[in-house]
Image (spheres, grey):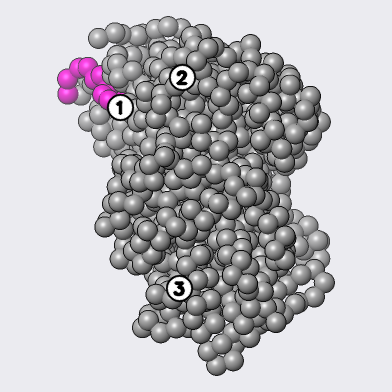
């Protein structure tokens, strides 16, 4: 079996793993990150997108609140373009009376979370749809974060500093050497999910940053880590009903927040302790609860059009904790397996929030340095991620660019204003295996039609690229193009401007693939993406969205007859995902 | 006083109105929008995949035993549907938008879809019909750079993978238009211009090889497509055919326009922008339907009413998060379970379809809506098309066949009672 040497192996391509790889590479470590699917496929890509001010935790979990506000300030510098500066409200609805609001105000002061009580008139001026029975409003520096972009930008930053990022590489075993009392993790066996090839990565230190899956990874070294998987269900509304993050001013509970995210608003979230981080089934009562609670903040929101529902799993951890996941700490946890389990060369970083991913990475790498007997300072807080010169995200940026550069005819996804060139560049500039990867890169298919129009177009564009690459006329269905893997050197990874139509104008129509691309054949891409979109809409199909879905059926069944295309024998990692994790609407 | 008020301007409503007018009735059509023909490929599909069969039906009149007992086709029978579709085909010829059928009336014809699958259709616009894959005559699929609703390479490769020889060519979009926001309808409109036709013909001429027929996106003219096709044939010397595109659908726009022109000629008004918002019934007879417009509510009185608002897609049904599912004009009883948990299956491409879409309005043998006990709801109300229970016309590929045959049957029932 092929073997690769490195200093640090990071397991997990969520925000934390990417952050650790970035931090490690900046400190000069030779670093490889492996992720079994795409970056952010796990919890990072499945949260509501809140950049915490810390306000949410000031009363219940002050340590977490302090971490949040400090990191909130840092990320506004390092990842400005991944953040929309929406500000946040904590509002007191008639159901939230009692002494919590005063406690909240005091706790904000104690934890250093800036908090200002607003006159109601001003709050209603800024958010006219808010419940008029709200009695008090506090403003805090919450924001809306694009965790897809942020994690990709972090990965690119890591790569620029020398790290290797391997997506669709799954850890199937940890290499443990030594006997009782002197065990040491020295690397991992990894499967390339695209080629099916196995190889060994040997490392001086292995960092387990696999979030809700951390227990499963630790188990490969015979170590017990009891992650408390707290499932959260979120519902995306078709309209951006608020421009400010709106939180209920009470102890954190189900459905108490609405986050404006790009063109939509997300209601979150439940917190239910589950046995496993997958599959992530969504039950009707969970959707109902989000809508009912949403009504308390924005009356009538339950009657508005819903786009999609999804679930993420918090990687909560509290040593010895046996209670409900809602009550488990949100603070980060670093497990030093040398001290805890007598296993050297292995750290697990879990808990925390998206907002604290950089701090989690710093904490982890401080410990790693100590164990490796070297002193190297953390540089991430002072280093900006690629693309940061674009400034904070603002809602109109894509529309502005499309109109300015007359890109209307080029729109592949009209809902999210994704142009053909953006899509092509996303294929070229970071490893791409499925259309869902391109969704995370560009927001393809995330709008009202949920892939109805753009799936066909994206597949057509990609197929044309595959064809140009092969350079042959009238060939049969293309074969999978060989992906880049660890021993063929660094992959192209240039994601800083993938979200910007203005950076992708005057692009040629005919573009070739690069060696890094490993997209499957067109028919499989189409089938998988439609199925993945279907999975997320079935829990919320009624009213206008049901009508939309019927139009999508008209397009793909009646007009395209796409369900009777020659089927590929092959499967993609996306097939693998939806096959065991499909929500038919009614739960188990 | 109107003899018949048709509610809905899709293929069902327009067919019913025309048939009724030809029978001497005084008819009017009201509709919320333009009808869903603008979204479809505008072929007439009778039965492509009798659910749950994943195999294309060679003979559209067979395999019906697997369809639900309540399927409208069981009541109509093949012979009657054939006669109705013959009548429809005769209309299209008279309207200057001729539809063609397989020489064998018991065979579906397989035509290329925009993604290169074979669509089993019964009738198709002549413009599409020459794409019949039965002959296996090689195809040159021509598309345009920057036309985002048609991908010739994907199409050609999929056709070739299924044994239909095909290759593709991409022409510069500048051949068609210099608009920055062109969709298929804009492109078709541009090709009504003879100069553009010549430019396109010359470009095709240099690409086509002897023995090939040329498949183009269905954008060959909005108002003058027969002339466009003749011009291209003249220049290239090759057979030209259209392949449907992603919606909006030019063939659907053409068919709507042709039917509405004909309705105009026979004195039937089609009033769009008229959403039915209420009605009044005396006893078991409907007196009027009220519509909203920008100025004022209007009451439309008629002796008879035909509901052709379509299913979920046409807007005939609505639903909410509690699982309530209702018919929007008359609140008719439906066969739909009021529980969202029973509406869907896990796979988007399940050959059995999504259960919710084969539910709807139950009718008796006279095409009159009935309740769960089989009792007529209103004695002067008829229903036809996509809102009928028992069929999933999109899954089955029976959308237009069902629309036309049930529309004609309902009109016949109300004129012969």
Residue B127 drawn at (x, y percent): 58, 35
Q: Chain of mark 1?
A: A
Is A108 included in the stretch rendered in magenta? no
In this view, B261 is above or below A25: below
Tell me the crowding category of disc 3: few under 14, some 14 to 19, or many 20 or more residues within 10 angstroms, Cα based. many
Within 10 Å of disc 1 (Cα), the crowding (few <14, some 14-19, many 20+) is few
Identified at 49% across, 11% down, the residue is A473
User: Which stretch appears magenta?
Assistant: A169-180
Judged from the image, the secondary structure of the residue bearing numbered disc 1 is: loop
Label annotation for residue B367: 3
Q: Main secondary structure of the magenta part?
A: strand
Q: Chain of mark 2?
A: B
Residue tagged by mark 2?
B138
Asked if labels 3 and 1 share a chain, the reply is no
Task: Kindly indicate the quadrant of the structure image that contains residue A539.
Answer: bottom left
Subunit under mark 3: B
* Of the pair A386 and A186, the residue shown nearer to us: A386
Please tell me whether residue A441 is drawn above or below residue B413 in the rendered image. Answer: above
Under circle 3, the secondary element is loop
Which residue is labeled 1 in the image?
A: A569
């Amino acid at each position: 079996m092929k073997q690769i040497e490195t200093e640090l192996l990071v397991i997990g391509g969520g925000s934390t793993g990417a952050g650790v790889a970035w931090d490690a590479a900046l400190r000069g470590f030779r670093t490889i990150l492996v992720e079994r699917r795409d970056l952010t496929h796990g919890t990072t890509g499945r949260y509501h997108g809140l950049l915490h001010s810390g306000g949410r935790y000031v009363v219940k979990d002050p340590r977490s609140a302090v971490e949040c506000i400090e990191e909130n300030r840092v990320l506004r510098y390092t990842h400005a373009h991944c953040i929309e500066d929406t500000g946040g409200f904590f509002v007191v609805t008639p159901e939230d009376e009692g002494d919590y609001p005063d406690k909240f105000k005091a706790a904000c002061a104690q934890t250093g979370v800036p908090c200002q009580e607003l006159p109601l008139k001003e709050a209603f001026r800024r958010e006219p749809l808010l419940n008029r029975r709200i009695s008090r409003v506090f403003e805090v520096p919450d924001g809306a974060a694009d965790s897809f972009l942020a994690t990709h930008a972090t990965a690119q930053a890591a790569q620029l500093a020398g790290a290797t990022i391997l997506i669709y590489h799954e850890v199937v075993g940890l290499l443990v050497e030594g006997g009782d009392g002197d065990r040491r993790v020295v690397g991992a066996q990894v499967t390339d999910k695209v080629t099916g090839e196995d190889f060994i990565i040997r490392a001086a230190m292995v960092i387990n940053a696999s979030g809700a899956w951390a227990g499963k990874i630790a188990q490969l070294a015979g170590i017990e880590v009891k992650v408390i998987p707290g499932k959260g269900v979120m519902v995306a509304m078709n309209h951006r009903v608020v421009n400010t993050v709106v939180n209920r001013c009470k102890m954190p509970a189900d459905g108490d927040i609405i986050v404006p995210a790009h063109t939509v608003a997300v209601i979150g979230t439940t917190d239910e302790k589950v046995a496993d981080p997958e599959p992530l089934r969504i039950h009707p009562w969970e959707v109902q609860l989000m809508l009912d609670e949403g009504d308390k903040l924005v009356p009538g929101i339950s009657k508005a059009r819903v786009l999609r529902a999804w679930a993420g799993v918090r990687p909560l951890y509290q040593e010895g904790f046996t209670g409900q996941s809602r009550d488990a700490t949100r603070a980060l946890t670093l497990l030093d397996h040398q001290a805890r389990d007598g296993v050297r060369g292995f750290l697990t970083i879990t808990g925390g929030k998206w907002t604290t991913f950089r701090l989690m990475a710093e904490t982890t790498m401080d410990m790693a340095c100590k164990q490796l007997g070297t002193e190297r300072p953390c540089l991430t807080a002072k280093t900006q991620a690629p693309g940061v010169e674009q400034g904070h995200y603002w809602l109109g940026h894509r529309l502005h660019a499309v109109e300015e550069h007359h890109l209307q005819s080029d729109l592949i996804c009209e809902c999210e204003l994704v142009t053909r060139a953006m899509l092509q560049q996303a294929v070229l500039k970071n490893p791409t295996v499925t259309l869902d990867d391109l969704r995370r890169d560009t927001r393809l298919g995330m709008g009202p039609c949920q892939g109805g129009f753009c799936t066909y177009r994206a597949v057509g564009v990609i197929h044309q690229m595959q064809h140009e690459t092969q350079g042959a006329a009238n060939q049969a269905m293309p074969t999978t193009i060989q992906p880049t893997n660890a021993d063929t050197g660094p992959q192209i990874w240039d994601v800083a401007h993938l979200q910007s139509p203005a950076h992708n104008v005057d692009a040629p129509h005919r573009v070739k693939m690069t060696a890094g691309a490993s997209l499957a054949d067109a028919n499989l891409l189409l089938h998988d993406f439609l199925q993945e979109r279907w999975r997320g809409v079935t829990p919320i199909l009624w009213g206008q969205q049901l009508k939309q879905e019927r139009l999508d059926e008209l397009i793909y069944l009646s007009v395209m007859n796409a369900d009777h295309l020659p089927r590929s024998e092959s499967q993609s990692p996306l097939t693998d995902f939806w096959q065991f994790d499909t929500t038919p609407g009614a739960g188990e | 006083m109107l003899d018949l008020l048709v509610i809905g301007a899709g293929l069902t409503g327009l067919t019913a109105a025309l048939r009724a007018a030809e029978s001497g009735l005084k008819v009017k059509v009201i509709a919320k929008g333009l009808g869903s023909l603008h979204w479809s490929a505008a072929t007439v599909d009778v039965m492509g995949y009798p659910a749950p069969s994943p195999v294309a039906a060679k003979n559209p009149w067979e395999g019906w035993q697997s369809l639900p007992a309540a399927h409208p086709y069981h009541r109509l029978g093949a012979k009657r549907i054939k006669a109705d579709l013959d009548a429809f085909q005769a209309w299209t010829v008279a309207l200057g938008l001729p539809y063609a059928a397989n020489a064998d009336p018991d065979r579906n014809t397989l035509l290329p879809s925009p993604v290169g699958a074979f669509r089993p259709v019964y009738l198709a616009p002549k413009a599409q019909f020459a794409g019949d894959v039965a002959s296996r005559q090689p195809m040159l699929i021509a598309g345009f750079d920057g036309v985002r609703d048609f991908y010739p390479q994907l199409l050609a490769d999929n056709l070739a993978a299924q044994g239909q020889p095909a290759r593709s060519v991409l022409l510069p979009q500048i051949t068609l238009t210099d608009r920055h926001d062109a969709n298929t309808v804009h492109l078709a409109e541009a090709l009504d211009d003879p100069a553009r036709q010549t430019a396109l013909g010359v470009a095709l001429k240099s690409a086509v090889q002897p023995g090939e027929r040329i498949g183009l996106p269905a954008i060959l003219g909005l108002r003058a497509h027969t002339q466009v096709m003749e011009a291209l044939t003249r220049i290239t010397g090759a057979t030209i055919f259209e392949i449907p595109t992603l919606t909006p659908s030019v063939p659907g726009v053409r068919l709507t326009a042709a039917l509405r022109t004909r309705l105009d000629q026979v004195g039937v008004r089609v009033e769009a922008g008229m959403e039915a918002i209420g009605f009044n019934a005396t006893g078991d007879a409907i007196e009027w339907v009220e519509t909203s417009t920008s100025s004022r509510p209007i009451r439309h009185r008629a002796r008879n009413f035909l509901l052709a608002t379509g299913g979920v897609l046409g807007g005939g049904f609505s639903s909410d998060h509690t699982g309530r599912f209702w018919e929007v004009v008359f609140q008719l009883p439906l066969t739909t379970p009021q529980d969202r948990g029973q509406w869907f299956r896990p796979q988007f491409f399940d050959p059995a379809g999504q259960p919710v879409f084969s539910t709807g309005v139950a009718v008796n043998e006279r095409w009159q809506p009935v309740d769960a006990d089989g009792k007529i709801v209103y004695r002067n109300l008829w229903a036809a098309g996509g809102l009928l229970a028992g069929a999933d016309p999109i899954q089955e590929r029976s959308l237009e066949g069902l629309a036309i045959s049930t529309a004609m049957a309902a009109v016949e029932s109300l004129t012969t009672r």
